[in-house]
Amino acid sequence: MTSFKLFILFMMITMMQHHGIIYRTGSKRPSRPARDEIRERTKPKPANMIGTWRISGVSTGNQGVISPDGQPVRQFEPGSKNDMLISFFPDSTFTRVGTKGEYTVGQWDFDTTTSSIFLTSNRNTEEIGVFITYADNGLRLINFEFSPTESLSLTEYGRKLPRFREDPYFGQNNWWRIKPARPETDAQIRARLLNYLAHTASVLSSAQIREQDYISLEFSQGIVRLYNVGIGVVKKDQIPSTWLESFHSADDAHKAYDMFEDYLFTGKHKKYQSGNWVRDDHRILVDIHNGMKRK
């Protein structure tokens, strides 16, 4: 490879790191586990559901159209049009988070006899058949079977954390997403902002625990901008619409923005230079959160 190509490659990696897309930990993609481990981790039981899963596609079929093997012909649609995470936690709660601001919290239960999961939210309960397998890339896959002709595929996105309440998608770390029914006081707006900052910090800390090779805020879009090393704020005309809509009004959202921006410029900030920008950004963000909480 020529020196010019190496230079371009280096610049691309640097730019991607600068925007929080690549996080080089030295970790490798998961290899396909041993046969006994595969058998154990694909059993239809509650413990194997815990963690975060990302929609990878929707499969639909028509029972009237039969393939040569006698099975209904199915059509698979990639999950990019329905990008969403679903997380299951040991306390029987689950959350669903979408890239367009969708957010649901509810209860889940598992029936090992029928290999079915029960999801309850908004006073509705749905029973869904579950089938777990492994992909060639070493990640587990879940198929939610809604009917003989309709299923949803999900790919393992984040394994369970030792302390599940610190998971970025656990309910108490996401109430900032729930739009209030009425205007909030400055104290309530600050509390909503602090919950968002704590959530973003947990995205960084969980990435370190899980040894992820990337950082993604696509399911946590907001006003925090990650740098290598440093924390900034997006321009006011670039605030994501999903973040604006999590407040009662745009005015309330702009109040929160001003609170954050003001602290960035007027607060005292400790420098971190560990050589790991994700660890340093997490520490900086925690300091900002704690400083604003005391203010």
Image (cartoon, grey):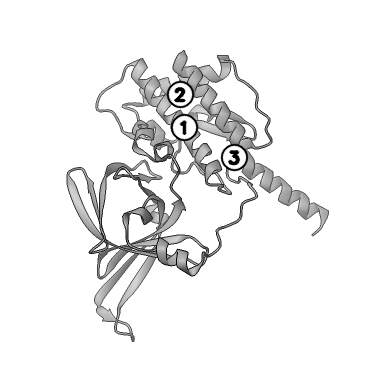
In the rendered image, the vertical position of residue 166 relative to residue 35, given as above or below: above
Q: Which residue is mark 2?
A: 257
Q: Residue at x 34, y 20 (%)?
A: 188
Q: Residue at x 24, y 76 (%)?
A: 63
Where, by quadrant of the figure, is residue 114 drawn?
Answer: bottom left
Residue 276: x and y in percent read 65, 37
Q: Secondary structure at mark 1?
A: loop
Q: Residues within 10 Å of mark 3 (few under 14, many from 20)?
A: some
Closer to the camera, 61 or 120? 120
Q: Residues within 10 Å of mark 1 (few under 14, many from 20)?
A: some
The residue under label 2 is which amino acid type?
Tyr
* CB contact under 8 Å: marks 2 and 1: yes
- The circle drawn on residue 213 is none
Where, by quadrant of the figure, is residue 1 drawn?
Answer: bottom right
In this rendering, position of residue 38 left or right of residue 152: right
In the rendered image, the vertical position of residue 80 relative to residue 209, given as above or below: below
In this rendering, position of residue 218 left or right of residue 25: left
Residue 64: x and y in percent read 23, 79
- What separation in Å lies between label 3 and label 1 (alpha carbons)? 16 Å
- What separation in Å lies between label 3 and label 2 (alpha carbons)? 20 Å
In this rendering, position of residue 38 left or right of residue 73: right
- The circle drawn on residue 239 is 1
- Visible residue check, residue 280: yes
- What separation in Å lies between label 2 and label 1 (alpha carbons)? 9 Å
Residue 72: x and y in percent read 29, 77
Q: Which residue is mark 3?
A: 19
Mark 3 and mark 2 lie on one chain; the one further toward the N terminus is 3
Residue 25: x and y in percent read 63, 46
The residue under label 1 is which amino acid type?
Ile
Q: Residue at x 23, y 63 (%)?
A: 113
* CB contact under 8 Å: marks 3 and 2: no
